[in-house]
Image (cartoon, helix red, strand yellow):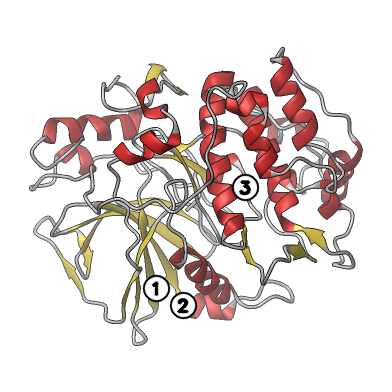
Amino acid sequence: MISPSSPANINTVYSISSKQKKCVEDYPLLQLNDGDIYHHIDNSLYNPPETRFGNVNRPRSNSSTKETLIVHKNRDGNGLKMVNEYVFVRKLGAGTYGKVSLAYHSGTHQLYAIKVFNKTRLKKKRLGLRNNPLDDVLKEITILKKLNHHNIVKLYEVINDPNQDSIYIVMEYLEGGSIMPNINYQLDCNSNNNNENQQHKQEVITPLSEDVARRYFRDILLGLEYLHEQKIIHRDIKPENLLISKDGHVVIADFGVSHMFDDTSDLLNSSAGSPAFLAPELCGYQDGSVQISGKATDVWALGISLYCMIFAQLPFLKSSTLQNIYDNIQFQPIQYPREISNQLLDLFHKILDRNPLTRITTNQIKCHPWTSENGQWPLLNSYTLQINDHDPLTIPTPIPSSLLSITNNTVSTGSSVSSFGGNSGASGY
């Protein structure tokens, strides 16, 4: 556990967050080679859920989200910007409509990721026939306020002064970054024959072992099951939105395009999210003429994300047009570039079933031999986690120079905003 009385530990954690140069005994990410993050996880963190979750010491409770209607701006003793009690340390990421900053609470020194949006700018923009992006931000806040689960990013406070132009969304800071930080799955629709090879060149990254991928996959599965129980379809499950916490668990983030459904119907009549992760049934009916199971589309995206973890690439070839990639998703045979276990291959066949009516469900995935290791590591039903508010990640006063000198990593995205965890490239909040 990291506390204000252990500044040496927190400095070491931040050295990993910026450069991944050191091996830290109490940090579940082990850096073996420059430029590559290898996932070394203590097995003690992965006891059966009923005992594992009881010992987790992370900043989470079932208390409601704080809502603040007054903004006070100031500077601290180091000249850093302050908004109310939060001291802004550095920018984590930027997107089309806003940015994300690393900040800490001046009283508790707890670290947060704070999304900042300009309300006037959002109101002026429209997304086709949809509402302006501000409505999407407010919808995301509504969704996050009702969620409380160990594998779902936590919303702590919304600061929205009606007399100010900015809205601040204070969220859990996930210092481990994305599960696959460098994977390139963006579709480039503007490539041409002269530069297509350069644009489509993919950075070489190392696939995860089946053991590590299984641990991450189980966390994602629990979070996704919880979302569906709360009548929420995520609609954008992908490695960028699957972040690693300090204790080595995976947390689902970025609910900018998520959908809340009523009663028992999870049917959708439109697509959203990244084209490369769309389910085949979404690719064939872009006009909204057919209603489609949202849960089944999330399961497909979960399968594509697992494929990325195992093979460090997408299962379908990239293309210069959206229609071509839709055709590939619907009809291209799925290849498996390296040898994998028969159980994992069977899971891929069932989770990447192009027929949503016969595609495996989250409950069936939990019972699958690969997921449960032949029943020896069963997954219990998802539930709301209730533990204390004590935060293991705090920083001492004065602020260490290592925190202030962290290299700023900023990547522009086409989504509302993407922000970046501690030690990797893109990861979405």
Residue type, numbered disc 2: Lys
Residue type, numbered disc 3: Ile
Q: Distance of mark 1 from mark 2, alpha carbons?
A: 7 Å
Q: Determine which residue is flagged by label 2.
A: 119
* Mark number, residue 237: 3
Mark closer to the chain start, 1 or 2: 2
SS category of the residue bearing label 1: strand
The residue closer to the viewer here, 402 or 286, is 286
Q: Residue at x 33, y 34 (%)?
A: 18
Q: Are marks 3 and 2 in contact (CB under 8 Å)?
A: no
Residue type, numbered disc 1: Ile
Relative to 20, is 392 above or below?
below
Q: Are marks 1 and 2 in contact (CB under 8 Å)?
A: yes
Q: What is the quadrant of residue 381 in the picture?
A: top right
The residue closer to the viewer here, 301 or 411, is 301
Q: What is the quadrant of residue 176 in the picture?
A: top left
Residue 147 visible from this viewpoint: yes
Dot 1: within a 10 Å radius of its alpha carbon, few (fewer than 14), some, or many (20 or more) residues?
A: many
Dot 2: within a 10 Å radius of its alpha carbon, few (fewer than 14), some, or many (20 or more) residues?
A: some
Point out the frontmost of discs 3 and 2.
3
SS category of the residue bearing label 2: helix
Please state the horizontal and vertical placement of residue 95, each as a whole percent of the image.
51, 57
In-image side of 128 versus 287 (left or right)? left
In-image side of 380 versus 293 (left or right)? left
Q: Distance of mark 3 from mark 2, alpha carbons?
A: 27 Å
Q: Determine which residue is flagged by label 1.
A: 167
The residue closer to the viewer here, 392 or 193, is 392
The residue closer to the viewer here, 320 or 286, is 286
Q: Distance of mark 3 from mark 1, alpha carbons?
A: 25 Å
Point out the frontmost of discs 3 and 1.
3
